Amino acid sequence: MSETYSLRNASGSIQQSAAGYYQRWRLIKDALARYGVIVGGLGILAAIILIFFYLLYVVYPLFVGASASPVSRYAVPEPSLGKTLFLEIEEQNELAARFTDSGRVVFFEAATGKPVLTQAIALPEGVSVTSFAPGRPANAGVFAYGLSNGGVIVVRNHYKVTYDKDVRKIAPELNYPLGEAPLMIGEQGVPLDKVAVKWEDDATVIVAKTGGKIHLVSFEKEQSLFAEESAVQRTDAVVDTPSENIAQILIDKNGENLFLAGSDGSLGFFNIADKNAPALRQRQNVVETGLAITSLALLNGDLSLLVGDSSGQVAQWSKGKDELNNVVLKKLRVFKVAGQPVVTIDSEQRRKGFMTFDAGGKMGLFNSTAERRLLEEPLGAHPIAAALSPRANALLMQGEDGQIHFWTVHNEHPEVSFGSIWGKVWYESYQKPDYIWQSSSAANDFEPKYSMTPLVFGTLKAAFYAMLFAMPLSLLGAVYTAYFMAPAMRQLVKPTIELMGALPSVILGFLAGLWLAPFIEKHLAGIFSTLILLPVGVLLFALGGQFVPKAIRHKIPEGWEGALLIPVMLFTGWLAFQVSVPLESALFGGSLRDWFSREWDIGYDQRNALVVGIAMGFAVVPTIFSIAEDAVFSVPKHLTVGSLALGATPWQTVTRVVLLTASPGIFSAVMIGLGRAIGETMIVLMATGNTPVMDFSVFQGLRTLAANIAVEMPEAEVDSTHYRILFLAALVLFLFTFIFNTLAEIIRQRLREKYSSL
Amino acid sequence: MIKSWFKSGNPWVWFTASAVSACLIMVVGVLGLILVRGIGNFWPGGLVQFSYQEDGGQVHEVIGELIDTSITPAAMAKVAGFAMADGEDVLVQYQIKTGNRDVSGSDFRWIQERRIKRQSTPPELIAVERREWGNFYGRLVAVKESGKMIAEGPEAMPVLQERLEAALDIFDKISYLEKKKIGAVNYGLERLRLERRKLELEKRWDADAQQRIAAERAVLDGEYKKFQTELMALYRDIRKDSFVAAADDGSEHEIALAKVVRVYQPNEMNVFGKIGHYFTKFAEFLADDPREANTEGGIFPAIYGTILMVIVMSIIVTPFGVIAAVYLREYAKQGFTTRLIRIAVNNLAGVPSVVYGVFGLGFFVYILGGKIDRLFYPEAAPAPVFGTPGLMWASITLALLTLPVVIVSTEEGLARIPKSIREGSLALGATKFETLWRTVLPMASPAMMTGLILAVARAAGEVAPLMLVGVVKLAPSLPLDGNFPFLHLERKFMHLGFHIYDVGFQSPNVEAARPLVYATSLLLVLVIIGLNLSAILIRNHLREKYRALEG
């Protein structure tokens, strides 16, 4: 305050005495500097706020739900060409197609409904379409027509994209991968009631219901090594099951599993890997009695089946194993979609999401992993057909009113919900709900597993073991250094330990991973015996000192115990290692590691929490030591002197006076050390196996949030869900350390005020 | 007596003392470990020839350097699956660097002492450092020129050394041509391409411009052809010579001199020879480019990259840090705001470094860098210029990371300057800024220096954020070179700390790379300790000085 006052006076006098240009310039400079400095100082505040809000800004879209907005509504194009069996939109949302029951395909502009092209499937004279189904895999664009004469036509629709002077042109192309002529299934002339197809270039499977039987027909292309032409081999089989009430047939994209849904709610699950002998795996009711299956779809990846029922629920059933190790369907979760029957289910083609329509025309968007309803939007009319575009960013719905609704959908991060990040999730083909972090895989239809719980667990576990190692060392050391140590020795010790803090973590990590980890693996018994013998050795030495004649004892200057102990501890350590070898042979059959796994069923990873604890503990010691030592050292002298004068021993003074007074400072030292242990990256990255497991064992590896970021960030696609989740991990780290540091700093500021008042 | 001793609390004092001793032992132990392993790396180990009995019973020769010895007690060895005789107490094993990765498939093997029939150190054994496939150990058989034998037997070695020297000369010329000359031509061609694209985008790609660019291009193409012919001739020369050496299994191998760095006979060397060898290797380590996926050769680009990054960072962090400290100490009213700022500074210091990396990647690289690219480098699209990790973003990110270090240190320096000095200056009529600029800051400059040194030490050892914002395992070109505009802030660079991580953990041949990692660690530790010690010294000196002033 006094400074500003004097300055104002000074500048005032300058203004009065001289009005020259130079004087004014001086004042301008002064003012400029003032504002510059203020801006600079507040910049620090801005920086930390910027970091926080930027992280938040990147993370925020994860928690924004989906939205959909209507683009247009138009009458069904070319209504004279038959009723709609199926709707489709191509990837760019420009073209859409309507498959009709007269065997026509009407292509129209998705946004306006303007017909572009109509193509006809070559139906034989006098034959009509009796059943129709889109094939698997979903992105192959394959469709099967079941005909009244017992034939099947498989059609493939491929959108060809060409560029002419940077203008995109999309043209549909229909072809017949199995030939234009209908393939006869079952008896000639008996119509196909239901049909399903799975198509691949070299293996096609058709399942159809005709004449009271379920027929399974497989075509395999056998590419001979020398011949140009390949022969197609056809296999016919009949699925042995009552078929009267089969309402829906689904084949998975590998052509190995077949699902037959009955209108009574029963579901038959068949193994058709052997095309000659389809075998029943399981038959069960998948809806409650009294309800009916109203829609059925496979989730992307074809590991799960979505069953919509007449009560408005969609249940996800996924392949798993039962107690006898048989492959069965298990109910993973249920989505309450609406109060009315679920009429259609459309799965996304790239994620584990799906779209539903209920009988009232209400659309719902869901994600199975996140168990999340992302959107609910009434479209108004009873749906006849609906389609979700391959990128899941647009939808078409034809209502009973003869109108087609075209909507765009924004649904960037459906796989994220509070539950999918922090809770247990029952992933497809897992035995039970679990916490899993597995962010990417080579497969396209992989279900990303973004549970941060194992990472947070790993972070806390690493921090716990590090603190377990560092706290006793640093706090006891700080008390001794600040209170008992001779000043001459303190002047050496403090910088040395501070130097320890300057060692780059990459070097500690390298030593931990490549030197310490193999060393501990080899000398596990030695490490344990050192832990036990070291305190004993110190105690014995100290006790022995009591019996040394006083004359000699008094020659040793006070406060140099630490220096005396170095050779003692080195010797004890050496002794412990020597003793451990025969002990290990005698007590543990040669190897303590094997003994642990044999007797206690504790596995041993070379890079484990013990290694991390020691290495990261080493890195944290100087942080805690330095702050705690300051706190203890600045306890006002009159307090300790007073205590000693009242007859307390030095140790009593330490425990009852010094520690109590300095405890806030020690607490903040521990907080800051903990913050450092939580955020440390390189040491954990190098000294653990980085396996995201949840295991308390000190001999198991772990993966921390920080290491996870370092490992995966360079590979994450910008603005993808993975990228944002990694930012979320960074934000969590930021908040963790922010809380610890702020707490510590506030306590320290309080303490400083207290000391100055004492 | 013991009871009263316990009651006095004395044992606990000893315990606290032992904690300090343990810390000291660990610090010294870690430093000693790095020192011993790092320093020993370049010393030429002798080559030992063993007659070794394999599992099958047959005896053959194994030649290699003795690397490590392991002694396992009998019980443990049994558990590990070794057959132990009753009388044996321990199993002694040696790790041998056998080299010849192209012949045997691996560089190292463990052998058991009990199976060694004979061992000797024949002086004629040679060690060949190659540019590919690691070291070769064996015996020299003959030297060849264009496939014809020119020397054999004992006289082969001098001839080989002579030829090798010539080959290394040519090799230097080749790398000079390839890296410097042709590199510059390629750089010029790329600039022309970008210039053309830019003119096209600006609709100024007219006849004039076309002519000019074509002319410049022609010049560069001509140069390129010239260098190419020179290069062809050099390659012809260097491929001429080769030598034949026998490996320990008796097979003979022809090794082209173009692929050889050095041939020596370690068992023949005397102490001075070894010292000479040591320093040549050490110089190579400091000044050469890495070879063989960074596991051999030098670390020059990493040193260079680290220094450059630290310099750019210092230029950014010093003014900001000093201004913030000046604000906190000289301008701000002590109160809520300063408390808030102090909390912010402490948090900046406490935020995990990897979070800075994430922030730098998202904010600096993608947002700022992307914007810069769109505004200033539209011609380079779709390839990013600043929109990708690079030296500049790494420096800025680390500047943010080390800001608290500079602030805290400078503030401490400012706090130690006696008030009387400021008041004296103000009383003489100086403005506040003049007081600051002429008296306070000069006096505090050693404190700033301390802060800067500590910041540099921190930055030199930091790896996690750098992995995200610009460090790569192998940078094709240095960020500062002879091509205009000389300093390429957008380039990626190599860094000592990352080099340690990468070579030690990501390299395909960790075992072979380990000595080099220890050497690199030693270098890094020495630099960082040196910086820290100098900072401590300056700080102590400063404290003394002001104590005198106050008194």
Image (spheres, rainbow, N blue to C red):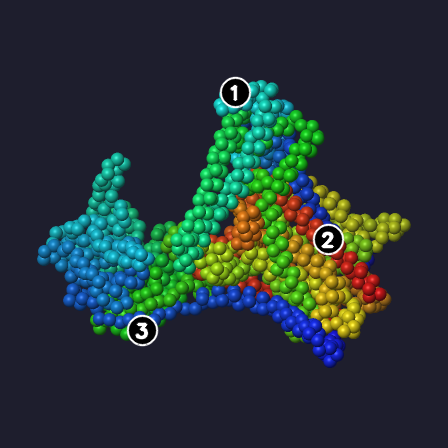
Q: Identify the image quadrant of the N terminus of chain A.
A: bottom right
Res A268 visible:
no
Instruction: Pick the quarter of the image with the C terminus of chain A.
Output: bottom right
Q: Mark 2 or 1 closer to N-term?
A: 1
Kindly identify the residue that appears in the image at 24 percent across and 57 percent down: A172
Please give the chain letter of the residue carrying mark 1.
B
Callout 3 secondary element:
strand
At x 54% / y 48%, what residue is drawn? B483
Instruction: Name the residue furthest bottom.
Output: A16
Residue A648 drawn at (x, y percent): 82, 64
Position in image of residue A354 (x %, y %): 34, 63
Q: Can residue A736 be seen in this view?
A: yes
Question: At 42% from the left edge and 48% from the top edge, which residue is drawn?
Answer: B214
Mark 1, residue position: B149
- Residue A378's label in the rendered image is 3
Residue type at mark 2?
Ser
Task: Locate residue A455, reporting x and y percent.
Answer: 52, 57
Q: Which one is in front, A298 or B330?
A: B330
